[in-house]
Image (tube, rainbow, N blue to C red):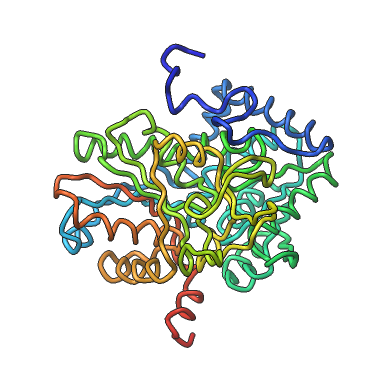
Amino acid sequence: MPEDLINSFMSGPDERGRFGKFGGRFVSETLMPLILELQAEYERAKDDASFWAEMDDLWTHYVGRPSPLYHAARLTEHLGGAKVYMKRDELNHTGAHKINNVLGQILLARRMGKTRIIAETGAGQHGVATATVCAKFGLKCVVYMGAHDVERQSPNVFRMKLLGAEVVPVTSGRGTLKDAMNDALRDWVTNVHDTFYCIGTVAGPHPYPAMVRDFQAIIGHETRRQMMEAEGRLPDSLVAAIGGGSNAMGLFFPFLDDRSVRIIGVEAGGKGVNAKMEHCASLTGGRPGVLHGNRTYLLQDEDGQILEGHSISAGLDYPGIGPEHAWLHETGRAEYVAITDAEALEAFKLCCALEGIIPALEPSHALAHVIKIAPDLPRDHLLVMNMCGRGDKDIFTVARALGVEM
């Protein structure tokens, strides 16, 4: 390991795909050759200037990067404390951060000669991003989505179909993101010859957690440059919502070795972090176990059976978390808190009213924590939250929660 990465929070994972005791590669023998092939291709791509040149061109001219770093002046004035900035990744093509990673994975799939792309999705944003990039490159796209999420995210389902994707409703379990990922993995095992599995978050077997993080780190790299231009120094705090945790790792990763920067991940507290597990706060209310090919914190019973969580946000409705987050939690480098459905809804309404931005329910959780802590911070405290998705997809869910007839 290079001398400058010893004792660095940016050095992981190790050669086994582990972040401390988390991560790894717990997959069937059938999948292992595919995983190893993907890892080898990604290692080659990382050192290939032409790969990154194509990524940069697409990020700029197709996605619309860099996304703005926006000073939320009215929100800052309303809260009366820290100076609040929003990293506006909801302005990306497709309306969320997901396309940052999808582009990278589908370029890898094309290098590997794969013609069929499968994906799982919860809120639908990863599914829409995957369908979008598949349409651009003429690839077959199949998206697995929990039947419960198909119902509550109908705008995104329609968008995926318009883009040519086949959307497969998953009825097993509670019909949410966990179940969609289960079925996608089954598909991959069955169709190994032509299929590439495009995972949407920093979870799954190695190399997915690190690979997705690397593609999403564009968020944090841009934030560093933009904050230096705007304020002449790094931010004091970073805040981002976490389901599996890709938008958060994207923002956090380039700052991990800057010990002066406080890092806060916000989990879905649902109806409250309680014994009934009516939440999806894996770090706040779970314990370590193995799911979807990696060891991480999970919501599970005493026998290790995975429990069904709850969140008003389809994108945060996952009973686990990316293994790098689990490691950052145990090392203490990052803090993790939980925000309830009710708190997220109030933040959603406040953002609409004060900033003219309709946020997705996922970053509304991050914003709710900003609303809690910003008033008690000094006015020269620089706080950045990741506005990782726009709220078009959530208007029906919000309307139902507020008792509004659509």
Q: Tell me if 394 is positioned left or right of 157 in this view.
A: left
Query: Which image quarter: residue 404?
Result: bottom left
Measured as percent of width and height from the top left, residue 284 is found at: 47, 53
Seen at 70% across and 36% down, the residue is 110
Vertical side of 24 occupied by 383: above or below:
below
Q: Nearer the viewer, residue 286 or 358?
A: 286
Q: In the visual, does 215 lie left or right of 140?
A: left
Which residue occupies 26% across, 40% down?
A: 235
Closest to the observer, 19 or 39: 19
Q: Residue furthest bottom?
A: 405
Closer to us: 113 or 149: 149
Give the answer, above or below, for where 389 lies relative to 35.
below
Measured as percent of width and height from the top left, residue 189 is found at: 82, 44
Image spot of residue 263 (x, y percent): 35, 42
Q: Is residue 223 above or below residue 158?
A: above
Measuring 74% from the left and 29% from the top, which residue is drawn there?
37
Q: Please identify the residue farthest to the top as the structure is shown.
A: 3
Which residue occupies 63% across, 73% down? 151
397 displayed left or right of 258: right
Q: Quadrant of residue 7?
A: top left
Q: Is residue 241 left or right of residue 380?
A: right
Q: What x and y, as percent, mark residue 215?
A: 52, 37
